[in-house]
Amino acid sequence: MSQDIRSWQALYAACKQGDVHRVRSFLQTTLPSLSPSSQRDFCLHHCSPASIIPCSALPCPVALTRLLVAASEGSSPTIFAYLWDIHLAPRGITSIPWDCLRIAAYKGDIPLGTTFFERDRACFRAAAPPTALLPGRRDGHQQFNIAIRNDRFDYIDFMLAHGGDINVGLDGGHDILRMVVRCAADDAVTGRRVAFLASRGSKVRESGALMEVVKGGSVELTERLLRCGADVNGIGEQGGASPLMIAANEGYEDMVRLLLGLGADVGAVGRDGRDAVAMANENGHEGVERILRAWRSKTETAL
């Protein structure tokens, strides 16, 4: 019964539980009949630190937005559709709240995503508003990032089929592939994610992901990225060095062999004027230096 809803917490819980009958009855019948003082309990407009004054609209639009989040948390498209169609859309609301989009991407909830798309055709191109981000952090700002980090491959395909752009809103240092190689728990997980994203059109050459995995020493991921189209001789934006120079600087012998075998230019010079041989020498990586000098000698002989 609707009279069971006597607090904001109970209303939130009913939305999360998907109890559309109780929610509808309360919002459309019980709430309007309450006294103004009781209605304040269901209004989330904070006009000053010391007071809560009900807004002119009933139900409160801020509270309704919070209830959309509850419906998303509870995977209840029915509740979401009711709140949106009856209470929010008539007031001119056109964009799905970011928190709802984030929850659906995290859970890979296609029925919920379908409900979003039916009401906002641009929803899968939306990114987090600045107020939703931690200071100095942007790694959760895009729905595809959230979905891939939780292995929601089906949901990514769903978003792509409904207007999403896997590269939208990304810029230097925050590309989706680069973030994937930074965050995954192990190479097997990362490899699956990289291969999937590359097959779905994620930018590989411009992502900066190759530099990350080379510096981290993962031969498996390096080969995976190169097979997916990464530039073996690309110069990193920050350090001005090629993957081979980074591997030489770190002393990764197996990495150096892999890069050379896949076309790395042993004679390339970085922005600081040094090549891979010089970097290996300066850092005391004798094994790497021998490999590089032998390769250069073989290359010069072949010419």
Image (cartoon, rainbow, N blue to C red):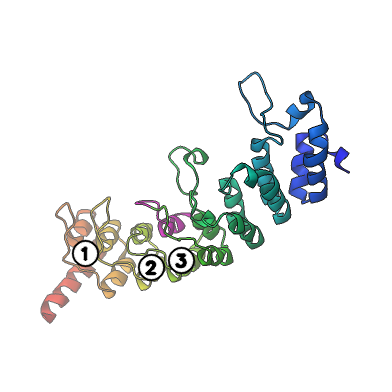
Earlier sequence position, callout 1 versus callout 2: 2
Identify the residue position indicated by label 1 in the image: 289
Q: For the residues carrying marks 3 and 1, which lies nearer the camera in this image?
A: 3
Earlier sequence position, callout 3 versus callout 2: 3
Q: Which amino acid type corresponds to the residue marked 2 in the rendered image?
A: Leu
- When asked about the image quadrant of residue 62, the answer is top right
Mark 1 nearby-residue class (10 Å; few <14, some 14–19, many ≥20): many
**For this view, does 46 lie left or right of residue 256?**
right
Q: State if disc 2 and disc 1 touch (CB < 8 Å).
A: no
Identify the residue position indicated by label 3 in the image: 197
- When asked about the image quadrant of residue 90, the answer is top right
Stretch in magenta: 171-184
- Report x, y in % for residue 19: 80, 50
Viewer-nearest residue: 230 or 32: 32
Q: CA distance from mark 3 to mark 2?
A: 11 Å
**For this view, does 214 lie left or right of residue 38?**
left
SS of the residue under disc 2: helix
Q: Residue at x 34, y 58 (%)?
A: 208
Q: Residue at x 43, y 39 (%)?
A: 136
- Report x, y in % for residue 34: 82, 30
Q: For the residues carrying marks 1 and 2, which lies nearer the camera in this image?
A: 2
Q: Which amino acid type corresponds to the residue marked 1 in the rendered image?
A: Glu
- Report x, y in % for residue 217: 37, 61
Viewer-nearest residue: 196 or 169: 169
Q: Is residue 65 above or below residue 302?
A: above
Q: Is residue 177 above or below residue 294?
A: above
Q: Which amino acid type corresponds to the residue marked 3 in the rendered image?
A: Leu
**For this view, does 298 lie left or right of residue 191?**
left
Identify the residue position indicated by label 2 in the image: 225
SS of the residue under disc 3: helix
